[in-house]
């Protein structure tokens, strides 16, 4: 399932010089972290009806059916009995089976689209549903504290966690403990995950790893396998080659709301901004223009870039770049290492955003 993005409008010359990511050091209060636990802008309008299953992958059609039924079963009173029935005059039958679902599949098969569609389809007010990545959830715990996070999310009907991180044992234990408390409070769960280090070459599916890592919570999840290829490259042309520094700079000056940054300097700046603030770093941007794209120098820098790529992709911000193409960002050692799935996801997403940015450069 793919979406198209219209390039931001250009003017003969912008009213002012381009913005700069490197000039931004946003502060994000804890209440904003909670309020922003909704599907990202890219997924504002997605629904089960807008997911286009691959006809060669029947598991995709099955996933839509199963998730639609799961959402319908979450209507009515909070599972703990503490909620009020606001949406139905008649109390529905209590949901049967596990109160959690795990979407299991490779990157680019539309797991986030389906997860966001589940959020939208669940019959509850937005403030009773939460949607965030694993990193955003750990950041919330850091901002609020564990007990306050349990109290804050415990009144929700549904918590959706995208990209559950299986490669950090400490954070996995923390979030698993949190989810246990939320299950006890009656919160329904839905999750996707990455693949454990060393597993990508052995298969694209992670349900065994996921269910083992969350330990006592496994009985609460129904694995739902979704086969398919990366939709971002399904029947689409190759990503455009990088442009020249001059083309990127001219496009930045001609595009209202564009940011212009030197790529090595941006990587340095990301080290000074906590990843929980990368979303705020991109506030109000219409395009990101980068000059002198080079291979990232080390793994810590690479992982920060992955988070930024996710936030840019969530917000559908086109990325125009000069230098090396995005498939040369990460070294062979990185692409063969424990975080390789993250790097492949970043390449896939940045490539899609580079395709979206082609219209910024005038012939």
Image: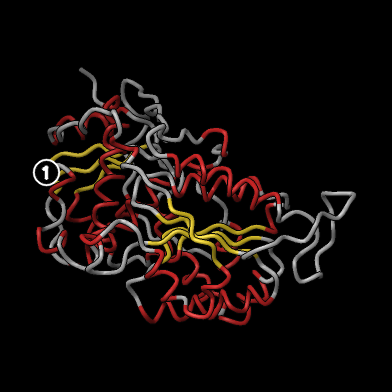
* Residue nearer the viewer, 150 or 2: 2
Q: Residue at x 26, y 30 (%)?
A: 251
* Residue nearer the viewer, 327 or 255: 327
Which quadrant is home to the N terminus? top left
Occupied quadrant, residue 249: top left
User: Can you say whether 256 is above or below 100 in the image?
Assistant: above
Q: Is residue 228 left or right of residue 150?
A: left
Q: Is residue 129 left or right of residue 33?
A: right
Q: Residue at x 67, y 76 (%)?
A: 151
Q: Residue at x 20, y 31 (%)?
A: 238
Is residue 161 visible to the viewer in this orientation of the structure? no
Q: Which x, y percent locates residue 94?
A: 77, 61
User: Can you say whether 18 is above or below 136 in the image?
Assistant: above
SS for tag 1?
loop
* Residue nearer the viewer, 51 or 136: 51
Q: Which x, y percent locates residue 48?
A: 56, 39
Residue underneath mark 1: 324
Is residue 325 visible to the viewer in this orientation of the structure? yes
Occupied quadrant, residue 35: bottom right
User: Can you say whether 201 is above or below 16 in the image?
Assistant: below
Q: Which x, y percent locates residue 149?
A: 60, 75
Q: Residue at x 54, y 66 (%)?
A: 221
């Amino acid at each position: 399932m793919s979406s198209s993005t219209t390039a931001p409008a250009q003017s003969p010359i912008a009213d002012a010089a381009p913005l700069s990511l490197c000039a931004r050091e946003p502060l994000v209060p804890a209440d904003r972290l909670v309020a922003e636990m909704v599907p990202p802008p890219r997924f504002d309008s997605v629904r089960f009806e807008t997911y286009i299953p691959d006809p060669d992958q029947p598991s995709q059609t099955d996933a839509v059916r199963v998730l639609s039924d799961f959402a319908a079963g979450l209507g009515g009173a909070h599972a703990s009995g503490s909620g009020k029935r606001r949406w139905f005059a008649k109390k529905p039958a209590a949901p049967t089976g596990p109160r959690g679902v795990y979407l299991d599949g490779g990157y680019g098969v539309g797991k986030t689209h389906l997860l966001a569609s589940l959020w939208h389809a669940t019959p509850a007010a937005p403030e009773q549903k939460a949607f965030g990545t694993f990193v955003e959830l750990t950041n919330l715990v850091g901002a609020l504290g564990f007990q306050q996070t349990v109290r804050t999310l415990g009144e929700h009907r549904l918590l959706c966690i995208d990209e559950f991180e299986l490669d950090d044992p400490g954070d996995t234990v923390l979030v698993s403990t949190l989810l246990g408390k939320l299950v006890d409070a009656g919160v329904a769960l839905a999750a996707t995950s990455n693949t454990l280090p060393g597993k990508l070459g052995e298969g694209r599916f992670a349900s065994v790893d996921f269910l083992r890592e969350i330990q006592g919570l496994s009985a609460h999840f129904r694995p739902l396998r979704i086969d398919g290829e990366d939709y971002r490259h399904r029947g689409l042309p190759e990503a455009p080659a990088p442009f020249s520094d001059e083309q990127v700079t001219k496009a930045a000056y001609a595009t209202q709301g564009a940011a212009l940054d030197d790529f090595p300097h941006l990587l340095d700046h990301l080290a000074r901004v906590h990843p929980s603030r990368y979303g705020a770093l991109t506030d109000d941007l219409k395009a990101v223009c980068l000059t002198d794209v080079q291979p990232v120098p080390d793994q810590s820098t690479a992982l920060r870039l992955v988070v930024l790529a996710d936030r840019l992709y969530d917000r559908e911000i086109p990325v125009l770049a000069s230098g090396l193409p995005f498939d040369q960002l990460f070294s062979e050692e990185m692409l063969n290492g424990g975080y390789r799935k993250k790097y492949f996801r970043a390449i896939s997403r940045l490539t899609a955003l580079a395709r979206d940015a082609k219209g910024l450069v005038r012939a």
